[in-house]
Amino acid sequence: MRPIQSRAKRILLSTVSSDSHTWNLVFLQLLLEERGYEVVNLGPCVPDAELVEQVRVQRPDAVVISSVNGHGHIDGRRLIRTLRADGDPALAAVPVMIGGKLGIQGAAQSHLADELVAEGFDAVFTDGADPAEFGTALQRMTGQRPRIAGVAA
């Protein structure tokens, strides 16, 4: 009798619509794949409607939004409102996190994380956040078991 193979948890990875940066997405994709996730990388400048459609089509276990252009709090706020207000229970239930350079005012923007969580994000990582917490939060949201040295733990 063969053991039941469970599929890798699927992560939908994207930037916000105004962010054309790609290296952050490449880095995150490699990091996530190294941790055993299947990653669907939508690339830069993804319109809100396209991201919502891809959540519907891909049915990811979580959505990770990375922004480095300093406008992540503006575009992210609009994106999460669109995703959560759609009326589709599956869209409302998918965990969504955002991180990176979310604003341009440095330490004066410490309130952004709380505001974005209040809007509907499940986790927010601003400049200076502990990188280890990203992995921990994603594991918690997806129920993913960590992989150690390329072997399932």
Image: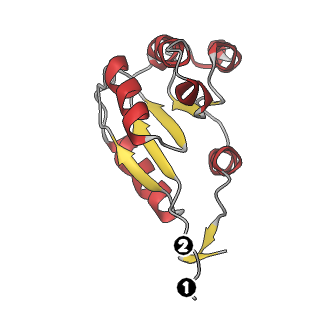
Per the image, label 1 sits on a secondary structure element best described as loop
Tell me, for residue 28, which label it has, or none.
none
Report the residue at 39% width, 30% height from top: 15
Tell me which residue sits at (31%, 26%) in the image: 46
> Which secondary structure lies at badge 2?
loop
Q: Is residue 153 visible?
A: yes
Q: Are marks 2 and 1 in contact (CB under 8 Å)?
A: yes
Is 108 on the left or on the right of 19, as rendered?
Answer: right
- Identify the residue under disc 2: 5
Residue in front for this viewpoint, 73 or 94: 94
**Residue 2: percent from left, percent from top:** 55, 85
Which residue occupies 55% across, 44% down?
Answer: 61
Q: What residue type is labelled 1?
A: Arg
Q: Quote the CA–CA distance across marks 2 and 1.
A: 9 Å
Q: What residue type is labelled 2?
A: Gln
Total residue callouts: 2
Residue 34, compared with residue 63, is above or below; it is below
The structure residue drawn at horizontal position 53% and vertical position 27%, both measured from the top left corner, is 91
Quadrant of the rendered structure where residue 50 is?
top left
Q: Which of 99 and 65 is in front in this view?
A: 65
**Left or right of 58 in this view: 126:** right
Give how far across and how far down residue 57 sits, in percent.
Answer: 37, 36
Q: Is residue 59 above or below residue 92?
A: below
Dot 2: few (<14), some (14–19), or many (≥20) neighbours within 10 Å? few
- Mark carried by residue 2: 1
At which x and y percent is residue 93? 62, 30
Foreground mark, 2 or 1, reads 1
- Quarter of the picture holding the N terminus: bottom right
Pointer 1: residues within 10 angstroms few (<14), some, or many (20+)? few
The answer to whether residue 125 shows anywhere in this view is no
Q: In the rendered view, how is the structure colored?
A: secondary structure
